[in-house]
C-alpha cells in the first residue's frame, strides 16, 4: 500500500490518500478512500482524474459498487420522505421548545 497525507480544507482535517496495488500491478484507490468520498462522487464534485479512479475502482470492486447503490438509494429515500413534510409551529408544545432552548445553553 502506498499513502500520503493531505489537508482536506473542506473538512478541516488531514486525510491519508491510500492506493492499493492490484494483481495486475496497477495502483487503485482503497475501499476506505472510495467510501470517504461517496457524497462528492454522487454530487459530481470530484475532479475528472479522481472520478476516473473512482469509476475504475467501482468497476473492479462489487462490494463498493453495492455500497454505492445502497448509499444512493438511502439518499433518494430520505429526500422523498421529506417532500411535503411541514410542521405547524403552533402545534409544538411550548414547554418542549423551552426545554430544548434551555438544554442548548
Image (tube, rainbow, N blue to C red):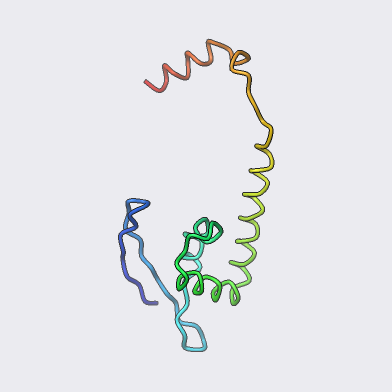
Residue nearer the viewer, 18 or 81: 81
Residue nearer the viewer, 72 or 66: 72
Q: Residue furthest bottom?
A: 24
Residue 25: x, y in percent?
47, 88
What residue is shown at x 59% (from left), y 17% (from top)? 89
**How many numbered markers are drawn?**
0
What residue is shown at x 65% (from left), y 37% (from top)? 82
Q: Quadrant of the C terminus?
A: top left
Relative to residue 82, is residue 42 drawn left or right?
A: left
Residue 98: x, y in percent?
47, 13
Q: Is residue 78 above or below residue 9?
A: above
Quadrant of the image occupied by residue 104: top left
Relative to residue 75, is residue 10 drawn left or right?
A: left
What residue is shown at x 63% (from left), y 71% (from top)? 62
Residue 90: x, y in percent?
60, 13
Q: Is residue 91 above or below residue 10?
A: above
Residue 83: x, y in percent?
67, 37
Q: Quadrant of the N terminus?
A: bottom left
Amino acid at each position: 500500500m502506498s499513502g500520503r497525507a493531505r489537508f482536506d480544507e473542506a473538512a478541516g482535517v488531514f486525510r491519508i490518500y491510500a492506493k492499493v496495488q492490484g494483481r495486475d500491478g496497477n495502483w487503485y484507490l482503497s475501499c476506505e478512500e472510495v467510501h470517504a468520498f461517496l457524497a462528492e462522487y454522487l454530487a459530481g464534485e470530484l475532479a475528472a482524474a479522481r472520478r476516473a479512479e473512482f469509476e475504475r475502482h467501482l468497476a473492479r470492486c462489487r462490494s463498493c459498487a453495492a455500497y454505492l447503490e445502497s448509499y444512493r438509494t438511502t439518499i433518494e429515500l430520505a429526500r422523498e420522505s421529506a417532500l411535503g413534510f411541514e410542521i405547524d409551529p403552533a402545534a409544538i408544545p411550548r414547554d418542549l421548545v423551552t426545554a430544548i432552548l434551555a438544554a442548548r445553553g
